[in-house]
Amino acid sequence: MIPDAATRPGGNSPLRKAGRLLLAARNTMIIAAITVVLCEVGLRAFNHVYPLPFFYSNSYNRFRVKPHVPFYGFELNSRGFNDVEFSIDKEPGVYRILGIGDSFAFGVVPYPFNYLTLIEQQLNAGGARFELINMGIPGTSPREYLAVLLHEGLELRPDMVLLSFFIGNDFTEARKVDRLYRYSYLASLGKYVLDLNTKLANFNLTTGSDYDDIGSLYTNASYVELGR
C-alpha cells in the first residue's frame, strides 16, 4: 500500500506546506502577468485601429472629435471643430478671430448657445464683418493650444487669437508630471471606469438628447476640486 500524505514522513510538515503555497503563488503570478500582458497588447492593438481618448498620447488630436459627428443636433465641421465650415482664405473686409481652448471653447452646449457663437453674433450686429472660428479641442492644455495655433491656426491668417484659459488647471498643466498609469492602457482603462462612476456620476451626456441648461457634467465635489 502506498502511504498517503497524512502517513508519509513529513507529508504535512510546515516546510512542505510552505512549498505548496509558494508554488501556487508563483503559478498565480505567472497567470496574472500573462493576462496583463495580453490585455495590454490587445488594448493597444484596438486603440491603433479605433483610437479612444482615455489612452495616453502626446498629440493634441487625442481628444479631438471626429468630423461631421452630430452634437446636440449640430454637425461638427470637416476638421472636427464645433463650428460651421470655413475656408483657409478669408473674404475681403472680414476681421478673422480664432477661438482656441479646451472643452470650454469647444463647448458642452448646443452650437447656438456656445459663447464663441454668441460673441460672433454680437460683433456682427454692429454692422462690421467678423468671423470667429471655434478651434477648441476638449482635454487640451496650453502646450496644445500653441500646437493648434502653429499647425492649423496660422495658415488661416487670423487678425486676433482669442484664448480660453481655464484657471482651474491651465496654470499647472504645463508643469504637471505625467502619471505613470497613463503609459499603461490597462491602467488607463481602469482609471476611466473609476472616473465614470465617481466624477461623472450625475450626468449622462447623450448628444442626441434635449439640452438641459441646468444639467451638471460633474458632481459638486469634483467640480470644486477641478477648479482649485
Image (cartoon, rainbow, N blue to C red):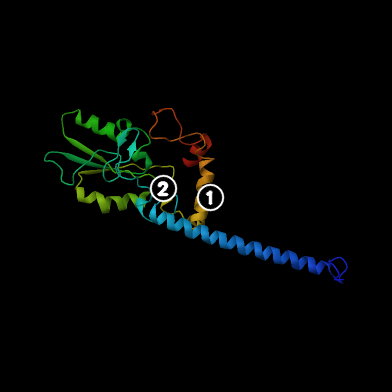
- The crowding category of the residue bearing disc 2, from other C-alpha atoms within 10 Å (few below 14, some 14 to 19, many at least 20), is few
Q: Name the kind of residue labelled 1 in the image.
A: Gly
Q: Gap in Å between the C-alphas at discs 1 and 2?
A: 27 Å
Give the number of callouts.
2
Residue 71: quadrant of the picture: top left
Q: Is residue 23 left or right of residue 138?
A: right
Q: Secondary structure at mark 1?
A: helix
Residue 136: quadrant of the picture: top left
Q: Earlier in the sequence, mark 1 or mark 2?
A: 2
Q: Secondary structure at mark 2?
A: helix
- Viewer-nearest residue: 24 or 110: 24
Mark 1 or 2: the one toward you: 1
Residue 190 - label: 1
Residue 133: quadrant of the picture: top left
Residue 171 - label: 2
In the rendering, at what x and y percent does residue 225 appear?
Answer: 51, 41
- Viewer-nearest residue: 25 or 77: 25
Q: Which residue sits furthest front?
A: 1
